[in-house]
Image (cartoon, helix red, strand yellow):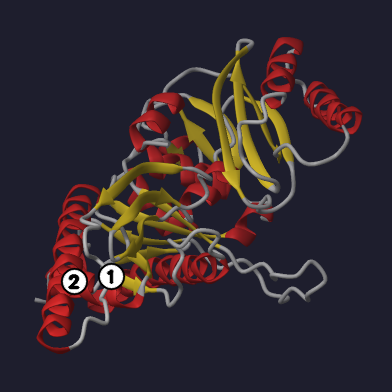
Amino acid sequence: MSDHRLVELLGRPGPWTCAYVDGPGALPQPEEDALRRSVRDRLTQAGAPAEDAAAIESALEDRNGLPSPSARVVLARDGEIELDEGFVGARIGPERVGHGPVPSLLPLLRHLSANTRYLVVETSRDGADIRLETSGHGRSDDKTEIEGDTVDITKVQAGGMAHARYHRYAENVWKHNQDDVASAVSALIREQHPAFVAVSGDVRARQLLGEALTDTERALVVEVDAHTRADGADSTELDAALAEAIAERTSAAIGDVRDRAAADSGSGGAEGIADVVAALQQARVDTLLLDARMLGDEQTLLALDGPPWVAADESERLGSTVLAEVSAAEALARAAVLTDARVLVEEDEPIADDAPRDDRPARQPLAALRWADDVGAGDQS
């Protein structure tokens, strides 16, 4: 989902009806129907208009093509569906249904925060299959098939001078094919700016492809030692490598926010609700980092209908109207989106359902700023 689309959605007046629930599963149809009715009933109990609850129940009937498990975020207003997003993988946190003056964004932002765009190149000596993917989408954003030369592509045991000649010829064909693959990969890197490029397939084809890429492009490559382009190939190793690479990029993005916020003795960042609110009110926040545990925090802020979008109390609203008193995490995230800041949510839930959860308070919100506050530097001069 584009940032522009989300900002446009937030500009529409409420009230809003929101549901964050599991996507369609493998239960018998009567049980799936009962789950949807339960969502509708809980929405009605939360104060949602009957037409909003019915619209969301109807939207959930669409299985949307995602494998199970999946998660679903649906927002309705005036009986119409305004947003319906599905994500591959289990829900992050509990189900949430509600109705109020502003839409609940954090379930959506938790999934979008982890989204990573990347290329998958499954190559062989006669070409390659290239896919542009975004994690969580469950489908390819773009697919390209490179069909190379297949004439005399196999090295033969001809003997003598003919043997060497055939080998050289076959090697040249493989190289030419991988040059074509590299050209397609280079173009996608320039146009789409993927976080990484996962390359699997035939060993020699991978080597030749690597040689055809530039140093900068090779730095993006995550090599997977599996020939996944072969008929009936197992994708387990590729899937595991993709999951690991995505997790590493997410962790690196969070580390980058912390480093930028700590730069120049902390002048490059804001930490704590009061300081982050002040930075958001000045539209200085480039990236907002929220601890997922903030979602259960009882502290609240005011959501406003115009700049500065968020306030600790009415004295800070600068002529804008207070829409609602909402959780601090929701208010900060909403203001960040409306001021064109990126929102990252740091997850630390245990992987296994029965694993212990660290007993600690939520970390304070942290922001990397677009420009540093140089007041302190002026005072020191």
Query: Is disc 1 surrounded by few (<14), some (14 to 19) or many (20+) residues within 10 Å?
Result: some
Instruction: Give residue 54's position: percent from left, percent from top.
Output: 74, 15
Identify which amino acid the numbered label 2 is placed on. Ala
Q: Residue furthest bottom?
A: 160
The residue indicated by pointer 2 is 170
298 and 216: which one is in front? Answer: 216
- Seen from the viewer's position, the closer of residues 190 and 164 is 164
Q: Is residue 43 left or right of residue 334?
A: right
The kind of secondary structure element at disc 1 is: loop
Tally of numbered tags = 2
Q: Is residue 376 visible?
A: yes
Residues at discs 2 and 1 in contact (Cβ within 8 Å)? yes
- Quadrant including the N terminus: top left
**CA separation in Å, label 2 and label 1:** 6 Å
Q: Amino acid at mark 1?
A: Thr
**Quarter of the C terminus within the rendering:** bottom left
Q: Position of residue 163 (x, y in %)?
A: 17, 83
Q: At 20% from the left edge and 58% from the top edge, which residue is drawn?
A: 371
- Is 285 displayed left or right of 235 in the figure? left
The residue labelled by disc 1 is 154
Q: Residue at x 42, y 49 (%)?
A: 134
**Residue 180 % position (x, y):** 16, 56
State left or right for residue 272 relative to residue 327: left
Q: Is residue 269 above or below residue 314?
A: below
Residue 308 visible in the shown view: no
Label for residue 92? none
Give the mark, 2 or 1, whose residue is nearer the N terminus: 1
Q: Nearer the viewer, residue 86 or 292?
A: 86
Q: Residue at the spot x=36%, y=72% of the render?
A: 202
Provide the secondary structure element on which disc 2 rests.
Answer: helix
Residue 45 position by quadrant:
top right
